[in-house]
Image (tube, rainbow, N blue to C red):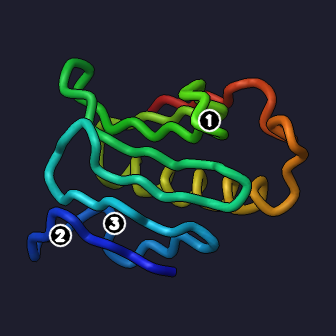
């Protein structure tokens, strides 16, 4: 796993001790920003996490092939909840990226979880 931290601060973070499995984290920000995390997985899956300041929630989207249509969308207001959902998303996208068919594979409808 290769991590390229762009915005680095020695603070507690939702990303501390997270294993992205087969993903490569290309952007990590420890601030509550619209773009906080980008992780690229095989077969063109992208896990994107950020802070939605309007809703006051963290949001995780998983897309494929730069479609910008989420195949998985999770949101939560607390770091504890988003860390749980982030681990769930990582496991799902890692598994899906290993077995996916050329057109969305097992992720056909958007899976949405809001906490």
Disc number placed over residue 27 in the picture, else none:
none
| Tag 2–tag 3 contact (CB < 8 Å) | no
Secondary element type, mark 3:
loop
Question: Where residue 6 appears, x then y in whole percent?
Answer: 21, 65
Q: Quadrant of the C terminus?
A: top left
* Label 2 CA crowd tier, 10 Å (few <14, some 14–19, many 20+): few
Asked if residue 49 is positioned above or below residue 24 in the image, the reply reads: above
Asked if residue 112 is positioned above or below residue 102 in the image, the reply reads: above
* Label 3 CA crowd tier, 10 Å (few <14, some 14–19, many 20+): some
Q: Earlier in the sequence, mark 3 or mark 1?
A: 3
Q: On the image, numbered disc 2 is attached to which residue?
A: 12
Question: Where residue 37 appears, x then y in whole percent?
Answer: 35, 53
Disc number placed over residue 15 in the picture, else none:
3
Q: Nearer the viewer, residue 85 or 48?
A: 48
Question: Where residue 38 appears, x then y in whole percent?
Answer: 41, 53
Q: On the image, numbered disc 1 is attached to which residue?
A: 72
Residue visible at 39% across and 45% down in the picture? 49
Residue 103 placement: quadrant: top right
Q: Is residue 26 left or right of residue 111?
A: left
């Amino acid at each position: 796993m290769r991590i390229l931290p762009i915005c680095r601060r020695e603070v507690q973070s939702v990303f501390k001790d997270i294993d992205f499995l087969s993903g490569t984290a290309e952007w990590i920000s420890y601030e509550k920003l619209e773009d906080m995390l980008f992780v690229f997985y095989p077969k063109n899956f992208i896990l994107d996490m950020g802070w939605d300041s309007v809703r006051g929630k963290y949001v995780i989207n998983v897309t494929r092939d730069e479609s910008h249509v989420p195949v998985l969308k999770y949101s939560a207001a607390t770091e504890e909840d988003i860390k749980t959902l982030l681990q769930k998303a990582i496991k799902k996208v890692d598994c899906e990226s290993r077995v996916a068919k050329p057109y969305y594979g097992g992720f056909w409808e958007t899976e949405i979880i809001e906490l």
